[in-house]
Each structure stands twice: as C-alpha cells, then as structure tokens.
Image (cartoon, helix red, strand yellow):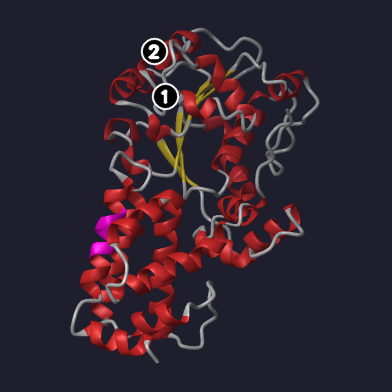
Amino acid sequence: MTIMAIHPWHRARAAQLFARAATLPHALLVHGPAGIGKRAFAAHVAARLLCDAPRVPGESGACGACRGCRLFAACTHPDLHVVEPEAGAAMNRDLLDVYAQKYVPEKKGDRKPSAVVRIDQIRELVDAIRLRPQISAWRVTMLLPAESINVNAANSFLKILEEPPSDTLIMLVTAVPGRLPATIRSRCVPLPLSTPSRSDALAWMRDVAPDIAGAETSLALAGGAPLLALSYARTNEAGFATGLADDLCALATRRRDLGACAARWKEQGAEISLSWLETVIAEVIRARAAPDAARRLPPHAPLQRIAERLHSTELHAFYDRVSRGRVLSGGPLDEQLLIEDILVAWLDLTDTPTKSLITRSLNR
C-alpha cells in the first residue's frame, strides 16, 4: 500500500505541528468533523516521525524512499501501533486498517465483529509499547476512532497517558471528542482540524473525480466535509433528498405515518438524514435574513413554502434540536427513536394554526 497523502487543506496545520517537533506533546487529540481527512492527517504525522530522512520543516513530509518509509508503506513498520474496533479493521480500507489487524482479538464462534475497542486490545498495546522503539527515533500509537473505546478499555488506556513511554507520540483521532471520558481528554493536547472552504473542497472533489455529478449538493449534504461528500456523490446519496423533503411535507399535512418515515430515514442513515435536515433549515433561515444569498442546496418548493410560514423563533429552536440530534447519531441511542423525536418536533412545529396555512399553500 502507498502512504496516505495528506489533504491540501491540512498541509499548513502539519507544518505548524512539525515546526515545533522538538517539543511535541506525548498525546494529541486530533479532532474535527467527520469526512475531512483526519485519518490521512494522522498517517501523515506518523510517516513523518518514522521517516529516517524527513523533508525540510516547511514541507513537513516523509521522504518516501528510506527504510522507515518503505516499511511504513508495506504495513510492517514495528514502531507504528494502530488500535481500532475489530469491525473497522476488517474493512481493510487503507494501511491503518492493516496495522490495526495486529491488535484484533482472535474471533471465536460466529459472533459479529466488535464495534468497540476492547480491554484486551489495550492491554496488548500497553505491553507492546513499554519497550523502546525498535528501528526509529519515535514510536507512534493511534487510537481511532477514539470514541469507540469502551469504559474498561478507557481505564486501561488512561495508564498510558498518565505514564507515557519516552519517545512515543499517542494520537487519538475523533469526530466527537465530547464522547471521550474527561480524564482522557484532559491528558491530551487538542489539535483541531477544520473543514476546508467550499471552493477548495469543490476543487479537490473535481480533481479527484472529474466526472462526478452533483458535487455541490453532496458537499452541502455533508456539511462541507469533502471526503464524505465524495462518498455521497459516488453512491448517488444526494438523490434521496427529494424523498426526505416529500416526507416532511406529507407529515406537515398529516398525510404520512411518522413511524414509516422514521424507518425510511434510518435506513438511509441517521447521520446523513439529519445533516440534510439541518442544512435545509439553515438554508431557510439564511434566505429570510438574506433573500438574494446563493443557495447551497437546490430548493424544494413545497417544503420551502411550509418553512417560510413558520415562526422564526420556533424555526431556530427546531434547528438547534436537529443539530443536537445529528451529534447524537452514531452513538448508543437507538437511531429510529432519535429520528422519531425529531419528526415529532416537526409535527409540533407545523401544528395548527400553521397547518391550515400550509395545506392551502400546498394545494395551490
């Protein structure tokens, strides 16, 4: 496998980090929205530290030709340790998944691959990194996604953070740092990664996939996260937006069953469904404040007419509720119940006397 390339919008951040390479902390909490390239950033940092002849600080990259780089790309570098859930490692998406397979416990019976990092994985990691680096000046340890660690494993991992081995950088990579125990977060130096500008994201998407369709809509659905947007565009996920908008219109006039709508949204994915809804409501709010502003999503006329008749204060409150729900998606809560809660709030928002106005509007 090739060394994962850092994305252009994170190069300056990497250069800043390596400008103070002599004083790197023992643990970094690399965090930012899903789909912006945090894995690639972490891999880039690891490759740079494990390189025998890194480039000048301004370029902050590995040479790609030394023994360390060759071993890194071959997924056999003894000083890189990656821990992630068994289910993640089994996906074999990139070289980090291959490294993570070293710490996957032996599967017994026909149980499903675990979606959490378990204590036996952390114990094995602790034993491995107590020794000095084998061939490099540094040893790099990654936990990703960091929020997947279970309680017992987190308590065991805390021992590494409290008494970090020398010459070791620990990187915890997450899109939701708030889900990590405060005891772990407090022992890491936060390193936030940002979403690129819309123009930079679109330019990258079109460079990677010149023939891709619906890049703008997919990027809006992904909340500006280019990797997530590219995934949406490649699988035509953007086409589902019309169906969700139709569901909202039908619910507003009580022409569709809430449970059936929630099941459909869950099947599509709570994260993308609520991200889309958050973007739509934000668009309506923006349109009220600046009617001539450029739209990030194509307008859905019936839904637009509904939203325009809602009270501004209630619309803002609903937006906040959707935002909180989106953050919770992918967590331990049942996703259908989470979506149903949001849709119940939509029913309350579009209840009478607004309902009669909405019905007349849709029947024009």
Q: Residue furthest bottom?
A: 364
Three-letter amino acid code of the residue under disc 1: Ser
The mark closer to the camera, 1 or 2, is 1
The tag earlier along the polypeptide, 1 or 2, is 1
What label does residue 120 carry, if any?
A: 2
What residue is rendered at 35% in x and 84% in y?
A: 308
Residue 156 appears in the picture as rendered: yes
- Answer with left or right where residue 234 lies relative to residue 341: right
Three-letter amino acid code of the residue under disc 2: Asp
Question: From the viewer's perspective, is residue 59 above or below residue 166?
Answer: below
Residue 139 appears in the picture as rendered: no
- For disc 1, the neighbor class at 10 Å (few under 14, some 14 to 19, many from 20) is some
Q: Position of residue 294 (x, y in %)?
A: 55, 80
What residue is rendered at 31% in x and 55% in y?
A: 339
In this figure, which residue is indicated by the disc labeled 1? 114
Question: From the viewer's perspective, is residue 138 above or below residue 205?
Answer: above
Q: CA distance from mark 1 to mark 2?
A: 12 Å
Circles 1 and 2, Cβ within 8 Å, touching? The answer is no
Q: Toward the viewer: 130 or 104?
A: 104
Question: From the viewer's perspective, is residue 201 above or below residue 349?
Answer: above
Q: Position of residue 257 (x, y in %)?
A: 29, 63
Q: Which residues are magenta?
A: 339-344
Assign a secondary structure to mark 1: loop
Q: Toward the viewer: 189 or 354?
A: 354
What residue is rendered at 45% in x and 16% in y?
A: 165
Q: Quadrant of residue 49?
A: top right
